[in-house]
Image (cartoon, rainbow, N blue to C red):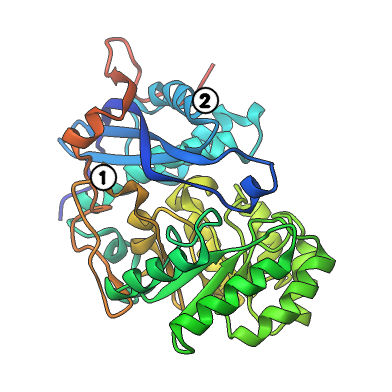
């Protein structure tokens, strides 16, 4: 049997894309005057090539602000990976984390690492001739999914109902409605109408986007309990562990949060004390697949449901490896970026059988989205055996 022969990273390319939404959307943060309407998604994409001819692609994203900062930090990270063995994923994650340590251990730094981490896992899957879910150890080939994009607050409830019925007809299994207005009674009324129109058997989720205080969430939650909701998402500030715990102990409806937390340490606080009923991590915000796996392991120990935030293109493969119940969020905003399309039927998404992360950039579509790009390649004089930084 032959010994393993190390591979080396010899080329990287970073791209910054601005992905337009077909329709600008507003959640409770916008309605309450805290953010502007969301009209596009910034993507920082990285392509990595190795000495042995393998290629990997990864990306991270930013909403409203931070896209240019992620891209510029990615350009600082890229040279640090030249000459490295792409299989040393955990060590390379730590290398990039320490390189940006002065920025902190969450936020911009970890979110930028995500693009490289995802690309390295893509290479590892292709080297093993396995899809990402099979590489990690899959538990299922399909997962229940719910649509979010049709239920934003700027959409009248009559149109939300139409959007919901259209989504269900397309094979989506559940519907999420945005709530969190100043007068929660208006939210309750929208939920009542949606439940009445869709019937008792359809899974309905609601998302307050952190806009209630504890007393409001308790009052609203008591009225919402009668509508048999699958969960109430982000009712409070994203870092309010005690408040979420109080809600889980008081309300019948399951409570979830986690999408705004950008480190394993932050999200672990909620898991360790069972402050929520379901955990909703975002691999891009956590730092990529590597820390996401850590979060899944911790959540499984507490027997929590998993419902990753956004980026169904990656989270579908990751959630397929979760040992317990999981949902995948259907938001189609990024679909024009990729050549591959997700299949849905009978309320479930089908996990891709393509090798690695199963994604490739649609060059025709992304050409019009491209804001800037930069290449990095092997240069004479690099000592590939020295991983120390000055």
- Identify the residue shown where x is 61% and y is 48%: 263
Query: How many C-alpha atoms fall within 10 Å of the one at disc 1: few (<14), some, or many (≥20)?
Result: some
Q: Which residue is mark 1?
A: 336
Please determine whether, in this image, residue 334 is positioned above or below residue 278. Answer: above
Taking 246 as reference, is 5 left or right?
left
Q: CA distance from mark 1 to mark 2?
A: 23 Å
Instruction: Name the residue rendered at 80%, 66% in the picture.
Output: 216
Residue 141, can we see it?
no
Q: Quadrant of residue 84?
A: top left
Q: Quadrant of the C terminus?
A: top right
- Residue in front for this viewpoint, 125 or 159: 159
What residue is disc 2 on?
A: 69
The N terminus: image quadrant: bottom left
Q: Is residue 349 above or below residue 365?
A: below
Q: Is residue 228 visible?
A: yes
Name the residue furthest top.
381
Instruction: Name which of mark 1 and mark 2 comes first in the sequence.
Output: 2
- State which mark lies toward you, 1 or 2: 1
Horizontal and vertical percent position of residue 355:
19, 55
Where residue 332 appears, as percent x and y from the top left, is: 34, 54
Q: Which structural element holds mark 2? A: helix
Name the residue at 76% across, 68% down. 217
């Amino acid at each position: 049997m032959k010994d393993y022969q190390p591979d080396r990273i010899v080329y990287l390319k970073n791209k910054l894309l601005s992905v337009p939404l077909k329709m600008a959307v507003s959640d409770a943060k916008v309605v309450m005057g805290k953010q502007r309407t969301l009209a596009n998604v910034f993507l920082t994409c990285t392509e990595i090539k190795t000495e042995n001819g393998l290629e990997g692609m990864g990306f991270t994203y930013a909403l409203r602000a931070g896209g240019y900062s992620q891209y510029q930090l990615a350009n600082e990270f890229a040279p640090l990976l030249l000459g490295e063995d792409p299989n040393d994923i955990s060590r390379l994650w730590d290398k990039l984390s320490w390189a940006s340590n002065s920025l902190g251990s969450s936020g911009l730094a970890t979110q930028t690492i995500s693009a490289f981490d995802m690309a390295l896992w893509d290479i590892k899957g292709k080297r093993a001739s396995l899809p990402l879910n099979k590489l990690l150890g899959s538990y299922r080939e399909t997962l229940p999914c719910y649509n979010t994009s049709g239920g934003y607050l700027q959409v009248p409830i009559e149109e939300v109902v139409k959007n919901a019925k259209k989504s269900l007809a397309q094979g989506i299994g559940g519907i999420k409605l945005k709530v969190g207005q100043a007068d929660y009674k208006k939210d309750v009324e929208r939920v009542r109408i949606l439940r009445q129109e869709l019937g008792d058997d359809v899974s309905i989720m609601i998302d307050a986007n952190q806009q209630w205080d504890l007393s409001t969430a308790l009052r609203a939650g008591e009225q919402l309990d009668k509508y048999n909701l699958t969960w109430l998402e982000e009712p409070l500030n994203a870092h309010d562990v005690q408040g979420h715990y109080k809600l889980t102990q008081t309300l019948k409806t399951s409570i979830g949060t986690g999408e705004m937390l950008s480190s394993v340490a932050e999200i672990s606080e909620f898991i360790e004390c069972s402050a929520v009923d379901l955990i909703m991590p975002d691999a891009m915000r956590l730092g990529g697949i590597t820390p996401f796996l850590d979060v899944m392991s911790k959540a499984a120990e507490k027997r929590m449901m998993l419902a990753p935030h956004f980026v169904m293109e990656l989270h579908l493969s990751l959630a397929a490896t979760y040992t317990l119940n999981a949902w995948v969020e259907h938001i189609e905003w990024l679909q024009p970026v990729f050549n591959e399309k997700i299949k849905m039927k009978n309320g479930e998404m089908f996990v891709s059988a393509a090798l690695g992360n199963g994604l490739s950039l649609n060059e025709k579509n992304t050409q019009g989205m491209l804001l800037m790009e930069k290449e990095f390649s092997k240069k004479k004089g690099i000592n590939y055996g020295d991983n120390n930084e000055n």
